[in-house]
Structure formats: structure tokens, C-alpha cells
Image (cartoon, rainbow, N blue to C red):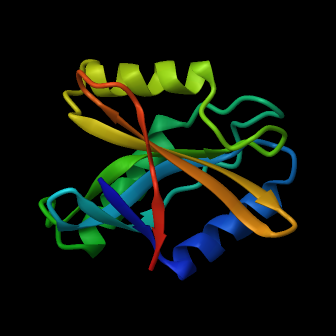
Amino acid sequence: MRLAMPHEFRSRLHGAVREAGRREIGGVLMAEQIEPGSFRLVDFSVDSRTGGAAHFVRSVEHHQEALEAFFERTGADYGRFNYLGEWHSHPNHLPVPSGEDAASMRNLVGGERDIPFAVLLIVRASRRGLMCTATLFEHGADAAEIALQSA
């Protein structure tokens, strides 16, 4: 899978993470499919209310509203614009999935929602900018790190 993160997207995400300080925040990722297996991050939601110093669980209702607004803006063209996965910050730890993060994503992909794959983006603000890792979770496969491309 190829995943592009435009500069404007990275800048907005960095601002949200810096504003949250030492508290974890997160939300859902929305993307445009450029071609099969190639996506460009377009938007994200932010739940800045439910995170703590070392834990984040997103509010389903808040993010459902963000997804519905995204689908309305993109003309409900689900084949091109859709939910891609989840993101959250690790302000006090390296930006890599924890065991709990991986279990949550495996449950999402292999669970009742019939989602064939999802990306988990973990971010951390630093003096040098935004540090990020992206991990692909696919039904029936091991998790795999994805290189983020600048766009």
C-alpha cells in the first residue's frame, strides 16, 4: 500500500497535536483512493476530550458526524473518498502502536464491521516537526508498517 500525506494535512495534524500538549488525542482518517492500493490522506477528525496522558479511546458519535460531513463534501463517492483508519497521538511515548493499539485495530478489521483493512497512524510532536508511523492492518494478515510519502 502507498500512502501520501500532503503538507497541509501534516501541518494541521501537527497543530492539533501540539495544542493537546501531553494529553493523547485522536480520531479517524479520511482518504482519497488515487488508484488501487494508493491513497492520499485528505481529512481527519479530532477528539480532544477523551484522551489522557497514556490512553485514548475515540467517541464514536463525534467521529460519525465528521465522516458524514466528509461524505457530503465529497459527493458520497465512496469508491474514491472513504474512511481509511484511525489516528492518535503518543505525546509521552514513541509514535509506534502499543499492544493495546494493535489489538484494537485487529478487532476493528476482523470484527463485526466487515472492514477488510484499516491504517493506524500514530503521531508525536517534536521540536523538529511531526514524527509519524503508519501501520496497515488487513484481515488475515500480519500488521505491516507503511512508508508515508510527502505530497
- The residue that appears at 35% across and 25% down in the rendered structure is 142
Residue 19 horizontal/vertical position (percent): 81, 62
Total numbered badges shown on the rendered structure = 0
Residue in front for this viewpoint, 123 or 49: 123
Residue in front for this viewpoint, 102 or 44: 102
Q: Is residue 67 above or below residue 137?
A: below
Residue 3 in which image quadrant = bottom left
Q: Is residue 58 above or below residue 4?
A: above
Residue 58 in which image quadrant = top right
Image quarter hosting the C terminus: bottom left
Residue 130 horizontal/vertical position (percent): 71, 64
- The residue that appears at 87% across and 46% down in the rendered structure is 22
Residue 136 horizontal/vertical position (percent): 38, 40
Residue 116 in which image quadrant = top left
Q: Is 49 displayed left or right of 138 in the figure?
A: right
- The residue that appears at 45% across and 40% down in the rendered structure is 61
Residue in front for this viewpoint, 111 or 133: 133
Q: Is 17 displayed left or right of 34 in the figure?
A: right
- The residue that appears at 63% across and 26% down in the rendered structure is 98
Residue 114 horizontal/vertical position (percent): 19, 27
Residue in front for this viewpoint, 47 or 82: 82
